[in-house]
Image: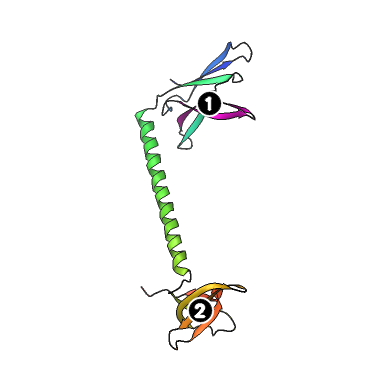
Amino acid sequence: MAITWTTYTPNTHQVEKVEVTHAGRVLAPSYTREVRAMSDVYCDASYVSVWNPETSKVETICLGYHFECCCTFGQAEVDASPEVLAEVAREAAEAEVARQDQVEARRQADLAREAATPRKGKTVRVAKGRKVPVGIVGTCIWIGDGSYGPRCGVKDGDTGEVYWTALSNVEVVQAAA
């Protein structure tokens, strides 16, 4: 039967009208949770999950608040067809695949960011600056705070000399694959 909405007159609680909506799209029994109905009024409210074929999404509909100021209240009866349930399952599977893709993309971005971040022990190249020759390739032997921001020590791989420069002046040398 779907959702049967009953509208009452505010003071007499006589039935004003009855309307049926969401036929064939109610997915699960209704449930109740406590909500804030007004600034200082808390009450229980009933909700139900329904399928919206226009957006191809599951939506939650409030059936009404369980206190005296609520004039319209809905009663839900599960009536989703097997076709609708199959569409809901397909949409949920697609959403899970999209979520897994986002997780993987985030993981790959984190790995790339970590690979490009200078750390102690990584091979780095001086890419800019005025006091250290640009192009020096060596091992990062120290990272710490300087008077003007983070600094690092780069031990030249050829000469063994250590150069001190701003951390922003070096970039990680990616190993050849």
Mark 1 element type = strand
Q: Position of residue 29 (x, y in %)?
A: 42, 25
Q: Are marks 2 and 1 in contact (CB under 8 Å)?
A: no
Q: Position of residue 162 (x, y in %)?
A: 49, 84
Residue 128 lies within the magenta run: no
Relative depth, front residue between 153 and 99: 153
Residue type highlighted by circle 1: Ala
Residue found farthest to the bottom: 159
Mark 2 element type = strand
Q: Dividing the image into 4 quarters, which one contains the C terminus?
A: bottom left
Query: Which corner quadrant of the image does residue 25 belong to?
Result: top left
Query: Which corner quadrant of the image does residue 159 belong to?
Result: bottom left
Number of numbered callouts drawn: 2
Instruction: Give above or below for 3 relative to 99.
Output: above
Dot 1: few (<14), some (14–19), or many (≥20) neighbours within 10 Å? some
Magenta highlight range: 30-50
Q: Which residue is mark 2?
A: 153
**Real-space Cα separation, disc 2 to disc 1, in angstroms:** 63 Å
Q: Which residue is mark 1?
A: 45
Decide whether the magenta segment is chiefly helix, strand or loop.
strand
Instruction: Give above or below for 94 relative to 87.
Output: below
Res. 42 in view? yes
Residue 134 falls left or right of residue 95: right
Res. 3 in view? no
Residue 24 falls left or right of residue 135: left
Q: Position of residue 86 (x, y in %)?
A: 35, 34
Rendered residue at 46%/82% (across/down): 155
Rendered residue at 40%/55% (across/down): 104
